[in-house]
Structure formats: C-alpha cells, structure tokens
Amino acid sequence: MDDDRPCRYAAGLPHRGTRALPEPERRTLEQRLQRQAWRTGLVAGAVIAIMAAAIGLADRLPRLALLLHGGVGMGMVALGAVGVIACLLVGRQPWRSLALLGAGYLSCALAAEAWRPDLCPPRWLTAEVLVATTVLGLCTVGLSLARRVRLLRLAPRIRADLAQGTLECFEGPRVLDRALARLHPADRGEPRSLRIEVLPRSGLVVRAGEQPVDRWATVHVVDVAPAQPHALRVELPQGVAPAAPDPRLCLRRRSLTPHERAELARHVARLRRRWWPAVALTAVVLGLVAWDLRTTSPGERFPLDGASLGWLALLVVTYVGYGRRMLAARRLERDRKLRWVVTVHEDAADPRRDPPTLEVLPISQLAWTERASPAGWRLSRP
C-alpha cells in the first residue's frame, strides 16, 4: 500500500525536516521587515509626488504637455525616466541593454535636434522609441513596487512564522541537473544537491546552502498528492490506445486517488482565478481611449499611433493568455472527472511490478509523474 500522506515541496525540492529558528536570526528578520515597510512607503510616496508634480507642471509647459498628451503623459514619461535610470544601475540583462539603447537613441535625437537638425531621425521613430523606453521604465518601477507591496501583504504571515520559530528544510537535486541527468544518465554523475530553509507559511527563504539569504526571496511551497508507483494498473479502454503503438512502450492506466483529484481541483480553481490581469489592462486601455477622445478636437481623426497599437496588441496577448488558461482549466477538469491516468513503461520494465516511467493525464496530455516524482508543473507557481 502506497503512503497517502501529501508530499511537501518548495522550489521543486522535497521536504526533509524542520529545525528551530535561532533567536539572533529571528531578530534580524524582524528588523529587516520593519525597514522594508518604511522603504515601501518612501517608494510609493515618491511615485505619487512625481505624478503630482508632472500634472502640476502641465499648465506651465503647455507645449510639452501637448506633445505628451497632458499632465498624465508627462508623469508617465517622468516615472519611465526614473525606471530607466534604475534599470541601468541595478537591472539585469537584457533589460539593461534595452534601457541603454533607448536612452542613448533619445539622447542622440535631442542633441541632433539642438545642434544638427539636418541629422535628426524621423519624428515617428523617435516617438516610438520614447514610448518603448517609457514602457520599459514604467515596468521596472511597477515591478519593484509590486514586489514591495507583495512583501507587505506577506508581513502578517512572516510575523506568524517568526513567532512560531520553526524553519522547514528542503533538499534535493537542482531542477536543471535533474533534467540533464534524465537526458544523459551515462555522461553525468550524481546531480548536485541544493538545501534551502524556508519559513513555512510565507515561503520566505532564510538560508540557501550554508549561507543566509540577504535579499527578500520567496518560493512556492506546495503539498502534492503522493505518487502511486505500485498501484493496480489495467489495460486501456478500447479506442483509447494509439492506432500504431510504439513496441518499446507498454501503455496502461490506473485510477486517480482522492488526493490526486483534490489536487487537480485546486489547479483548476487557481487557473480560473487569474482573471484580474485582463480586467486591469482592459480598464487601462479604456481609460487611455477616453483620455484621447477627451483631448481630441471635434472633427479631428482619432489618434491611432504606435503607442495605441502597442496597448491594443498587449490587450490581445493578455486575452489570448487568459483564454489559454481557461482552456487548460477545462481540460484538467475533464481529467479530474475521468478519474484515471495513462501509465507508460519502457520495454525493459515489468508493468505488473515496476513503477511507471511516466504518467500522463489523458485529456490535457500533461505529465503527471516522472519516475515516481511529481511533474514540474505541479510544483511551480500557477
């Protein structure tokens, strides 16, 4: 009989035990949490101040306000400039290179406008580069602020973890090393092991290896249904087996356990809950359209420039992504109702005794287990 207790994973690593959180580490984390709250407030205040100053300057700089669609446009460009500077200073590749290219092009265009008008690039190209660079900077500011706000939302859980004083330990081969070992088992030795220590409720990483983690980093901690390597397996129903089966493989099926069906139900619910990006972006696009209509003179053609097309393209991509999530949720729901999974054995394995090499959900065609271990998508953040 296989164990029915759920298996706990963090960042794809299996649970290995717990240990007490030392008092000095607990005090250090509490102090860092307080400093993080103050810094988040300062960043949010700076964003509000920049937007308010830009809107206030719109009346004093009417020509610039007209070019940038009013004070809101001036504020977005100002925030984008701050984000580009931050990206140049602390950003990662390739975003730092993109920020450098955008800032360099705009600087050269301004210099040519002032001293060599005959060498000025086309205005439409400068406008598109300005929009792209501004969007890059706004994304940098937005992601930084979102990470800080997320940590504030996790603060009650972090404080509860610190009050409990327990760390969960997870250890196992790195995900990439594990995948390479499966692809080339003869060419590689044992995969290198990674150990992390995590606060149980918040998923905050306290240690990685033997070193404390100085940056705020969280991992996805999840309980998954245990594998069933020795469950009863029977022949596939008629009409389900492939017309030309691979002779090296033996395909059978087994029933899903109640824990596995409950896990599928949780995945379906998470997929269906991710509707807010489409709604938020729709509200932003509608707001921009309303602003353009308000600033457009009667009889003037509606402005459909590169920026507008970019927002519309982003909206289409978001809706396509949401549709794919809904389709995936529907397929997983059908797998849950079907209540069985296809097991795959290699030719050297005995399907009556040996664990399957692979288990696949029949409708969604997603791997369920790989060599009696949960598939990667079951351990990742939805």
Image (cartoon, rainbow, N blue to C red):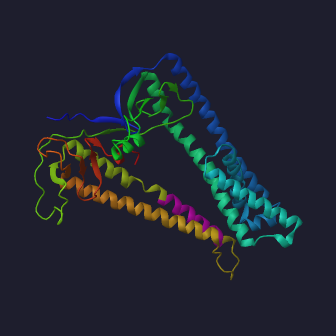
> Residue 295: x and y, percent?
69, 71
Q: Residue furthest top?
A: 23
Q: Is residue 198 visible?
A: no
Q: Residue at x 36, y 43 (%)?
A: 379
Q: Is residue 353 left or right of residue 74?
A: left
Q: Is residue 279 magenta?
A: yes
Q: Quadrant of residue 372?
A: top left
Q: Nearer the viewer, residue 45 or 348?
A: 348
Q: Is residue 56 magenta?
A: no
Q: Residue at x 61, y 66 (%)?
A: 288
Q: Residue furthest bottom?
A: 299
Residue at image position (40%, 30%) is 200
Inspect this view and state whether residue 357 appears: yes
Q: Is residue 375 above or below residue 198?
A: below
Give the residues in magenta.
278-293
Q: Does residue 125 appear to the left or right of 150 in the view shown?
A: right
Report the magenta stretch's main SS.
Answer: helix
Picture quadrant of residue 105: bottom right
Q: Is residue 117 left or right of residue 201?
A: right
Question: Looking at the picture, how far across and down is residue 242, in whole percent?
Answer: 18, 63
Picture coordinates of residue 218 (x, y %)? 48, 37
Q: Residue at x 28, y 55 (%)?
A: 332
The front one of 367 and 289 is 367
